[in-house]
Image (cartoon, grey):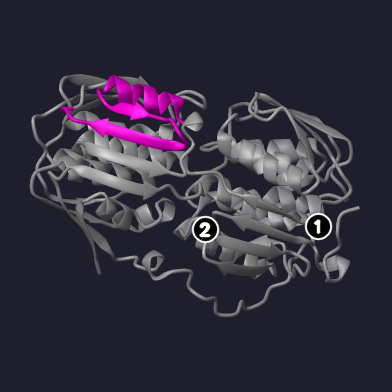
Amino acid sequence: MPDALPVAPDRLTRPVQFRAPALPRDRPHIDGAMDKLRIRGGTRLDGEITVSGAKNAALPILVASLLTADELIAENVPELQDVATTLKLLRQMGVSVERSGNTVRLKADAVTQTEAAYELVKTMRASILVLGPLVARFGSARVSLPGGCAIGARPVDQHIKGLEALGATIRIENGFVVAQAERLRGARIVTDMVTVTGTENLMMAAALAKGETVIENAAREPEVADLANALNAMGARIRGVGTSRISIEGVERLHGATHRVMPDRIETGTFLTAVAAAGGRATLRGADPRTLDSVIDKLREAGAQIDTQNGLLRVDMSQRANAISLRTAPYPEFPTDMQAQFIALNSSADGVGKVTETIFENRFMHVHELQRLGADISIDGNTATVRGVARLTGAPVMATDLRASASLVVAALAAAGETVVDRIYHLDRGYERMESKLAALGADVVRVK
């Protein structure tokens, strides 16, 4: 049976409210909401860096701690703003959290509330991931809808549809998803679209459901597989990960485990693209090139030489990049999270490239900022046509989202003169000390307070 909360049953539908204690800051660099990056471009990138753990794998794995009263130890957890937000959310629920470097120890043996408030959820859509674990283990959850997201605009409705199939009663109340269930029961779930967080949420919920659950049209991303590996280490029975059909045999309880978070494939791809744009020769340690086939193929098409032997990832770019065309699609196709960086690469490449975005609407907001650097880009629907210019020129620009900020950094490294990138708190959400790693490669980049 699901674990019981240490509160009276009649209060489960109205989660305990309390004032959270002051929390320690994870690291100074993720508190600089007004920081900027000053980049003087035109310098080759040469040297060696180590890739951090994957943000998109770490977040659901940290949330999985809610599924057991035993200790979960997550290793290789990056120091990012989104990770800090997730840990703050878990602490507010009563989860014990201890962090030492890139190792996080979590224990959810004294959870005091099952609510995720809007104040935290509005800053990070991945907060919706607590919904499945909470209702699966405690029978109750009250989670704010992600900020600025009506149901249907993003696949939050697929989370709700899947949990209802598992037997949860769900209603939308004052901007919250309120879910209840005595115990979830296995079911066959067919999602209307491929959704990574939806697959992860339902996979975690089904791990404690009674009977077998089958998720059809499941996301195949490596981060989903990493979560499944962590859950299986905790005693779950999950099969079919990496395919579009995942089966989960529910168990009575999960236990503690130690799991190492996979390398961040988007960070890896971003640094490879930066070297391709600026020129140079770099070695990336700790990367997993098997998760980047489509990105590596496109970089080679652009003229980069990439070697994946001996556990290292090496990139060598000694020429001006060739413009390339691509189309984003769910894994294993080209990732939407690398689209902006490749538009930046195309901006100073030789030729004309067409980039088609099929996953998210409004994901060309970085184009207007790239145009401030001299990029020649036109947009028609969901396709951006990029005509490479001989040289971009530095200018003040403003980041609009996480991957857009990375594209501005890539473009600035290839541009002549100085570029100042404002609002880099977006960058800090998903890149661990990017300026330090770039500096290790010889880039002229500093964080400006």
- Judging depth in this view, the residue of 69 and 75 nearest the camera is 75
**Residue found at x 46% / y 32%:** 289
Whether residue 117 is visible here, answered yes or no, is no
**Residue at disc 2, secondary structure:** helix
Q: Amino acid at mark 1?
A: Phe
CB within 8 Å, label 2 to label 1: no
User: Does residue 319 appear left or right of residue 186 in this picture?
Assistant: left
Residue 104: give x, y in percent of width and height. 60, 62
Q: Magenta stretch containing residue 319, yes or no?
A: yes
**Quick check: 111 left or right of 103?**
right
Question: Taking 149 as reference, is 432 above or below it?
Answer: below
Residue 38 in the figure: left or right of residue 72: left
Residue 204 placement (x, y as % from top left): 72, 44
- What's the distance in space between the residues labelled 2 and 1, CA to CA? 23 Å
- Residue located beneath label 1 in the image: 138
Query: How many numbered circles does the render carry?
Result: 2
Residue plotted at (46% across, 40% down)? 287
Neighbour tally class for label 2: few under 14, some 14-19, many 20 plus, Cα within 10 Å: many
**Foreground residue, 236 or 207?**
236
Residue 148 or residue 112, whichever sits in front:
112
Q: Quadrant of the C terminus?
A: bottom left
What mark, if any, has residue 22 been given in the picture? none
Residue 336 part of the magenta segment: no
Magenta-drawn segment: 292-320
Q: Secondary structure at mark 1?
A: helix
Residue drawn where x is 52% and y is 64% of the image: 119
Residue 30: percent from the left, percent from the top? 40, 64
- Residue assigned mark 2: 83
Q: Amino acid at mark 2?
A: Val
**Earlier-in-chain disc, 2 versus 1:** 2
The quadrant holding residue 275 is top left
